[in-house]
Image (spheres, coloured by chain):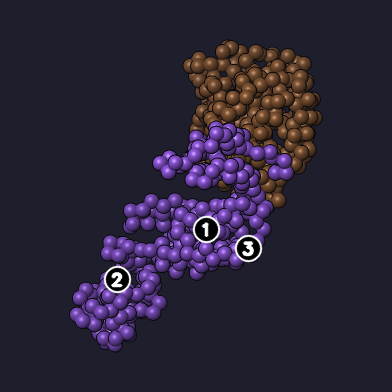
Chain colours: A brown, B purple
Amino acid sequence: MIYRENKGSFIHRVNYGLPFETLAIEEANGCPFNCEYCFLKSYFSEKDIVVYTNRSCLFEELESKLQEGKKRRFYLGEYSEPLWINRFNKVLPEIIEVFKNYPDEELEVRTKFNDVDFLKDVRPLKNIVFAWSLIPEDISERIEKGVPSVDERIKAMVKTKNMGFRVGVRFEPVILYNGWERGYAELIKKVSFALDEPLEMGALRLTPSLRRLIYSKNPDSEILKNEFILSNDGKLRYPRGIRFRLYSYILNLIPASSVRIYMEEEFILESLNKHWKIF
Amino acid sequence: MEEIKIEEINIEKPAVVVHIGKSDFLEKSILNFGLLSPPILFKNNGSLEIVDGWERLRIAKKHSMGRVRCHILKCSLRDAFLFHLSLNMKWRGFSDGEKILIFKRFKRFGFTEEEIVRLWEKVSGEKMSKNFLMECLKLYDELPEIIEFLHSERINLTSARELLKFPVGWRGEILSFLIRVKASAGESIKFLRLLEDGLYLGRIKNLDFLKKFSDLKSAVKEVFELSHPYTARCIKEIEKIMKELPPGFDMRIPEYLSSNNVELKVNFNILENLKIPENLNEIFSKIRKIVVEGVDIQGE
């Protein structure tokens, strides 16, 4: 792990294709886990995890963005694993504290980690949501190396919810694999306690360079064993019909009004909206 | 200007000259009119090297012209090389194959990659990324035969760079296939991208099957089916439904069924009293359903 100053910006605009503006906070970058599909591997040139030390600059920039009062969603976890980083750099409780004064702005802490004990000392806020990225247990064991198991993550979700925090489920990415229908059905049953918050999901997408990187590390990667097409934004995605059927299957198991689909092409959303009224 | 004996000039393996091929026109002109424009030389470690006029000197030597009048510059090897590039860039330009030789020569003369990128832009006016440079150097090291193919435009540089996405052992075989089937640049790129998809998907494990193809169109069809099995299934399903249409209807399907506004183009000539089937709308909605919602993904 490298500790150093961030000479650039801490907050970046990200486009999730959601009906509100989204910004990502870069308190650190890099992740200790080894998920085969992770874009961070091709995004950052450094293999080490970088933690930024100039926290005052981070808070200054964050306050100034929040003061704009645009009712936006801020993300922690776009560039790093915020719960894991918090073990070494206790910045998360302070970031949450900042949001106390901006109830119309939302913070989503996206994670795959299961250490939530530090939250005992943090006051829950209505505009903070802890969201866990989940894929079915069987595929997770094979492609999410070093990550707490799905059950461990769900236990952490229950713990967090019991502490009074909002807890969300993110199927990020939705993956096609042999047995995916059973896998997603079981997973949805397990996380049903957290479906009072909208479930957000997006089917797997890879950049061509990430696909080459995955292949160079593991030519037999299960991720690559599916057909991809190059979409207009330069990302490789499952063919249109496959994506439609993945989303349809999940939408048949969850009230569609509490589902958001992101990073998806307009025509897929249009096609889905003809059958379901998505949130 | 000095009169120099041709044997004193290093024509066989010139240090700075990058030039592939020969010109019959120039040979005829020299035989008729002699050397109209004097070559430019420089001295390098006691040897007379060519800055400009290599082809003229090669022809003069071939026809035993003995002595030629030349300009002799006082300059370093690196400066002579840059001068050679500037002069030739102005008068004849360089082929893609020669460009790769130039980049290799830059490296041999000890220029850093950053310097090469900067100097090449200055000399040629072409912007180049470091990544592009590295790929060109890799092509030279791993597929030396490609220089000649690039020079003779039997493959273009974009297609050649696509080759680097494949395992090392595959590159030569794919290159010789592309040269054999004489594909255009666009066709080559399409073929290579499909082949790459098939490789990652694990449906193309070796290239033996390419041996049976003598044209690219049928090879692309097979590679498409291997690399896009789901889309190929959708298309087959659509083609099956299209058979319900009477003769005279011509329907085109978008290749990957993926574009933003998937458009089914149906052409028919109404003047020829073509009978429009009563179930036309039903056929269209069956096709639309496959285009939008796909087919069952069991077994994918």
Q: Secondary structure at mark 1?
A: helix
Q: Nearer the viewer, residue A33 or A59?
A: A33
Residue B74: percent from left, percent from top: 28, 70
Of the two numbered discs 2 and 1 on the same chain, state the one appearing first in sequence. 2
Query: What is the three-letter code of the residue carrying label 2?
Result: Asp
What's under tag 1, amino acid-wise?
Lys
Q: Residue at 74% of width from left, 36% of height from top?
A: A180
- With A21 as the anchor, is A145 left or right in this view? right
Which one is earlier in the sequence, the residue at label 3 or at label 1?
Answer: 3
Measure the alpha-carbon separation of dots 2 and 1. Answer: 44 Å
Quadrant hosting residue A147: top right
Q: Secondary structure at mark 2?
A: strand
> In which chain is the residue bearing label 2?
B
Determine the residue positioned at 29% across, 86% down. B63
Q: Amino acid at mark 3?
A: Phe
Res. B209 mark: 3
Q: Mark 3 or mark 2, which is nearer to you?
A: 3
Task: Find disc 1 in the rendering and name its residue.
Answer: B217
On the image, the x and y values in percent for residue A13 come to 51, 28
Q: Are marks 2 and 1 in contact (CB under 8 Å)?
A: no
Q: Nearer the viewer, residue A225 or B69?
A: A225
Residue A58 figure quarter = top right
The answer to whether mark 3 and mark 1 are in CB contact below 8 A is no
Q: Is B298 situated above or below B211?
A: above
Q: Which mark is residue B52?
A: 2
Quadrant where the C terminus of chain B is found in the figure: top right
**Which mark is drawn over residue A269?**
none
Q: Is residue B245 toward the left or the right of residue B36 in the image?
A: right
**Nearest to the observer: residue B21 or residue B104:** B21
Q: How many marks?
A: 3
- Residue B71 x, y percent position in the rendering: 24, 74
